[in-house]
Amino acid sequence: MLPYQSLAEAEASIGRNLSAAENLWFWYSASMPDYILYYHNIAFLFLIFTLVPLPIAAAEILFPSALSPLKLQPKVRLPLSSFLKCYKDVFCVFFFVVGPLQLLSYPTIKMVGIRTGLPLPSPWEVGLQLLVYFLVEDYGNYWIHRAMHSQWGYEKIHHVHHEFTAPIGFAAPYAHWAEVLILGIPSFVGPALVPGHMITFWLWIALRQIEAIETHSGYDFPFSPTKLIPFYGGPEYHDYHHYVGGQSQSNFASVFTYCDYIYGTDKGYRYQKAHLAKLREQWKSDDQNGTDTSNLNGKLE
Ligand SMILES: [Zn+2]
Ligand SMILES: [Zn+2]
């Protein structure tokens, strides 16, 4: 809720005219309690989880061969019932775990100093804070995920997330409720260290979720804008982790590749990639020489 009765009062307090975005924010949030603004995250999380994976899932079910060339594990075809079960199970975790966690965490958000007032942060401030949030969360997530691959962690908790050896977008948050709770912690560390505006916090939660859905999509789109991000893992990187499954000691990081590189946990993946690249070269030259390579495929199968 903003401490101003009118636009004029807000402008007098800031000492300048409000920008178009600030006008919009004033109009939307002036009389809305801060906890309601924070609880918007519950709706955003649910809407993004429902809508973002939908186009690829629909295309995969309705026109399975159309996207096949971009599918990372093209021989895996999940029935509609698997998509529906995944959606239902994640919905339950949202309803019973994520939602209540959001409701209960409001005092923490207030305590660390996430603000809702004016002026709005500059795009630079938002961008730098988001970068910190992504880096901090990625580092924390790496070690938690690595610990989950211990025998105890995997058998008791993490095996649920690995039920999908060929992941789909809806399976990004598909996990044991305890894993959802534990992995929620590093998401709050960045905003606690560098608290920003509520809009930055909304963006953080939304972008992180969209990133996880892309990473679990099962498809590697060559035109994805995320390919421009330095040290970004992406779908192929995380798909390998799911493909190898419970025994995987490779590709633990959720967003970037630097942790796996520094701590040497990307060796299996790099070996596999180099091996496939060599095979592709071999197939290309066999093709040129007229050798039959029709039963070979460069993707994981
Ligand atoms: Zn794992
Ligand atoms: Zn995963």
Image: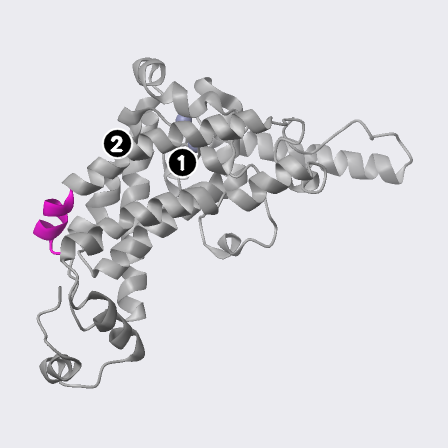
**Looking at the image, which residue is at 29% across and 61% down?**
128
Where residue 124 sits: x, y (%)? Answer: 30, 68
Q: Amino acid at mark 1?
A: Asp
**Looking at the image, which residue is at 40% across and 36% down?**
260
**Looking at the image, which residue is at 26% across and 30% down?**
96
Where residue 221 sits: x, y (%)? Answer: 60, 48
Lateral position of residue 290 relative to residue 125, left or right: right
Q: Quadrant of residue 259?
A: top left
Q: Is residue 106 magenta?
A: yes
Quarter of the picture containing the C terminus is top right
Element marked by disc 1 = helix
Q: Which residue lies most toward the right here?
A: 290
Pointer 2: what residue? Answer: 97
Where residue 77 sits: x, y (%)? Answer: 63, 27
Q: Which mark is residue 260?
A: 1
Considering only vertical position in the picture, is 209 above or below 93? below
Ligand 2 within 8 A of label 2's CB? no
Q: Quadrant of residue 62?
A: top right
Front residue of this view, candidates 119 and 240:
119
Predominant secondary structure, magenta span: helix
Q: Is residue 130 magenta?
A: no
At label 1, counting other C-alpha atoms closer than 10 Å, the crowd grade (few under 14, some 14-19, many 20 or more) is many
Element marked by disc 2 = helix
Front residue of this view, candidates 97 and 73:
97
Q: Which residues are magenta?
A: 105-113
Specify the quarter for ligand 1.
top left
**Looking at the image, which residue is at 50% across and 43% down?**
53
Q: In this orientation, does residue 268 appear?
A: no
